[in-house]
Image: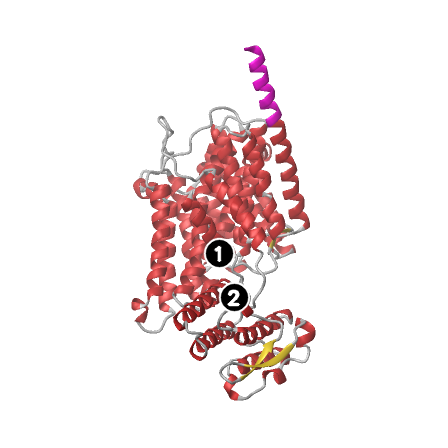
Amino acid sequence: MLAVTIAALTFGIVASRPAPPPEQVPPGSDFAAAARTIEALLDPASGVDPIALLPADFSTVEKVVPGRLRAPDGTMRAVHVDGGCSTPLGDENTRWDYSVGCKAHDLGYDLLRYAEKKGHPLPADLRRRLDDQLSRDMHKQCELNPKNSAGLCEMVADLYTVGLVVNSWHQRWGPPRAEPISSWAVGLLVVIFLFAGRPPWSRRSPAPGAPEAPPVDYMSMLRVLSMAGIVVGETVLAFTHASGFWLLQLAPLLFFAGGHANVLAWRSSEGDYGAYLAIRIHALLRPVFAFVLAWLLIPLTLELLDAPEGTIASVGPLVLEPLWVLGIFLITVAACPAMEWLYDRFGVVVPLAFLVGSTVVHAIGSTDAYLLVSGLLLALGFGQLAFHWEDGPLRQVPRPALIGVAVAALAGFVFLRYLPLLGIAQVSLACTVRTFDWVPARTVGFLRSRPMTVYLVYVGLVLLYAGLTSSVGLDWFTRPRTWVAVSMITAAILVAFFWYERRPHAVAALPGPVNGVQALACVLGVGYATLGVLGFAVTGVTWHIGAPALLGMALDPLANLIHLMLGGYLLHVVHTGKSGRTWPWLLTAAACVPPILSTWSPFGTVVHGATVAVALAIAGHVTVTRIRTKATVVNAG
């Protein structure tokens, strides 16, 4: 439980950090005036009066009264008259009186807020220097007026400095802002309970007679190779910014090979849609844990390695692109039965219709919503081809014809840059294979059974390369920050391997059909898990103020984690047969409250509010049913 709490708090601290401020002062007289005023605040011995440099509308925008106070060292300081040290006891009650330095520091922070309100935050270096100035002022006060306790004064000054640095680091040295502590505290408490509820990727020893992993086949290899190609392709783009590596855009091939796994799972479920969803999504959610770990590692590790902020944005797609693909693929899993119905009635027309629809949607708009719908139609189209592979039609097409189609589609893609043509070329070449004895079963089996470990090792190597090559010289080897970054990467890899993948095992079959309350838990679990995966892809590797939206629903990292954990928890409830109890539904209702508080949007409020109402209704129904059942048993006895 302690480890769960630490993990949740770590996520909360990292995920609530905003996007970094710009590296240069933005254009405009107001911003230049604010920056000059801060520079004057940072050099009180220069004799320049910061108040004379204030932007003309500063007091109007900030509602702040500036003034002047004589500091203990004799310099005249510009201050926020009503400011202070923001300590629990107040600056008047401190023994050494840091008030002048704190009020000058507050005026500097007011200028940072002013620039943000005007539309452009000031560079992070200014906040760092303001914090350093306050630290020097406090320590200087300990020299000038130690009050017979110089050692204690220095210790208090150090503690205040640590608080300054931690708070500024958490806000990425950007404009100071109030933290939504209450909503985040409630959200993290919910996350802790969901973690403690053992979601489907939690560590469990396989029960006696548990099913073995499905055998490695050609399609397994295609799934592994296509996902690896996507990750490697994003890495190449991150470091070269070249557009010539389109051969590594293997998402269509992944949808085709993954669609084949969906077909097999659906047909083996004998029409039990709930069981199919619970087992299939259960297996696919496990790798998401690695992406969430990588999502945390990228900004922290690169910051420790002193990599430029641009490097974080460049390396971010290493996590975001696979999350987009995986989120869309989760939707295709849910749609598989409908896709089989279409396949049985319309055959080859279906994939063509989906690919044309994807093209039309992509041409209409380029927002996230349009891209999501276009990508989903593309995924459904190539997933539909898996039915034609499994039932034989694609395998019966002569090789020369498939090669001809691949060459023509590839040539068309080169000239038109039309992604479905590249996918058609990939699938056509994949279908030319007729014998499968050559598949490296052991290697593919290892990669398939330990995807988190392999992915995190790869991400760790990429992060070290990105961070270390951005530094000049070899002093990085002796810096403690470098080894802290290495330790973080190593810890993530060890957790993924020893806690989850040391003894991988297949997902156990459900004891019976999924229906009633179980089916509802399954549907909600799939929906929220998919929303969580896509949410991380939308919000990116840093939290951008303003809450990015997905299909009209505002999101942030905390909401994403809650959605992902809630989806996993509900699927776990289905697997353990606990959907008929009260507690899971009360926890479901509670889990929907923090996203409403932290990311308000009309559609999000409707979705979460409806879930709360349904969950509470089911909790009440389940409770009444259990009480009546117990009463019946007692009366019968």
Task: Report which quarter residue 79 is drawn in.
Answer: bottom right
Number of marks present in the image shown: 2
What is the spatial separation of the Cα atoms under label 2 and label 1, in whole angstroms? 15 Å
Identified by mark 2, the residue type is: Pro
Query: Foreground residue, 119 or 388?
Result: 119
Residue visible at 41% across and 52% down?
A: 229
Residue furthest to the top in view is 637
Amino acid type assigned to the residue bearing label 1 in the image = Ile
Mark 2 element type: loop
Give the residue at x 59% y 15%: 632
Q: Which label number is shown at residue 149?
A: none
Point out residue 265 in the picture as x, y percentages from the top left corner: 47, 32
| Of the two numbered discs 2 and 1 in the rendering, the one whose residue sits closer to the viewer | 1
| Magenta span includes 137 | no
Looking at the rendering, the stretch of residues picked out in magenta corresponds to 623-637
* Picture layout, residue 431 above or below residue 159: above
Say the numbered circle drawn on residue 13: 1
Looking at this view, name the residue that lies furthest to the bottom.
47
Q: Tag 1 or tag 2, which sits nearer the N-term? A: 1
The vertical placement of 414 against 1, above or below, is: below
Instruction: Find residue 20 and name its label.
Output: 2
Magenta residues, dominant SS class: helix
Task: Please check the rendered image and state whether residue 636 is part of the magenta-colored stretch, yes or no.
Answer: yes
Does 326 sit left or right of 503 as displayed? right
In this view of the protein, which residue sits in the foreground, 296 or 160? 160
Q: Position of residue 72 (x, y in %)?
A: 50, 81
Q: Could you say where residue 230 lies in the image, as x and y percent from the top left?
A: 44, 53
